Amino acid sequence: MSTQSLFIPFSTIVIKEVSRFTRIWVQTILPPAISMTLYFVIFGGLIGPRIGTMNGFDYIDYIAPGIIMMSIINNSYANVVSSFYGAKFQRHIEEMLVAPIPNFIILAGFVTGGIVRGLMVGAVVTVVALFFTNLQLHSFTITFAVVLMTSIVFSLAGMINAIFANKFDDISIIPTFVLTPLIYLGGVFYSVDLLPEFWQKVSAFNPVLYMVNAFRYGMLGESDISIVHAFIMLIVFTITLLIISLQLLSRGVGIKS
């Protein structure tokens, strides 16, 4: 297939995905901004002064990158899992599968939609953070790379969840019982160095830990783990989930009867 014949279906899916969540921005963009504002007020404004500093930074400045990353993770994931399952539920995903569109184009379209929503919400939350913190950008390249790769990872994770989901309740199980614990135990509100040695080793299996610390390094120049190690893990997660997603789509798991 020519490049143009691939670009048309890809751009169509992306436009549909972006217009879907921007059309209802009051439900998709505004709530995360309000929720993150509450985090800054409660954890930064009320609890922060009692904690003081963490790794040489004011507590509110230290947790700000983690809060921004939390919003990116949640929204990248939520956009793809809800959109793809909606396509399954309404059965118009079958039209894509019978059309001469490669599976990787379908996957890329939905994932790009998740990336765009994650970046938009992340940008809004960053603006909110500026009212509470003195954020400085240590490295734009690292910051953008981490945000992009994190959005891809959790968009792919959302796709896998949607593929296996058989009812609407199934798309809320993973965010509730897996995603939320990973985020809260991923060093968003604390330095992993504060944990006992055993729990530091357990945290090493948490993918969010690498994302939060790599993003914190890009913003503040501070990280609990090696930035090289963090990027290696991000690449591994991305490739692994990409392969799984493509395999599931090609086999028609949860889609073809």
Image: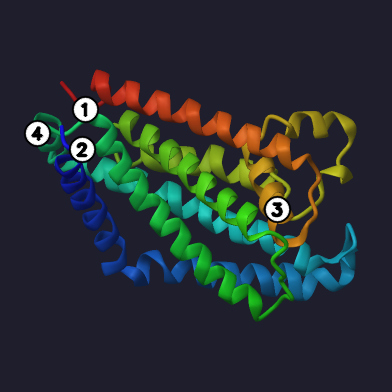
Residue corresponding to mark 2: 88
Residue at 26% from the left image edge and 37% from the top image edge:
105
Of the image marks 4 and 2, the number of the one nearer the N terminus: 2
Q: Report the mark closest to the observer, 4 or 1.
A: 4
Q: Amino acid at mark 2?
A: Lys
Q: How is the image coloured?
A: rainbow
Quarter of image, res 185: top right
**Residue highlighted by disc 1:** 255
Instruction: Give yes or no for contact between labels 2 and 1 (Cβ–Cβ under 8 Å).
Output: yes
Q: Secondary structure at mark 4?
A: loop
Instruction: Determine whether label 4 and label 2 are within 8 Å by CB.
Output: no
Residue type at mark 4: give it. Ala
Residue at label 4?
Answer: 99
Q: Which x, y percent locates residue 242?
A: 42, 30
For the residues labelled 4 and 1, the Cα–Cα distance comes to: 15 Å
Residue in the picture at 33% in, 26% down: 246
| Front tag of 4 and 2 | 4
Q: Is residue 167 shown above or below 216?
A: above
Task: Please determine whether, in this image, residue 49 is positioned above or below residue 99.
Answer: below
Query: Which of pointers 1 and 3 lies earlier in the amino acid sequence?
Result: 3
Q: Secondary structure at mark 3?
A: loop
- Asked which quadrant contains residue 62, the reply is bottom right
Nearer-N-terminus badge (4/3): 4
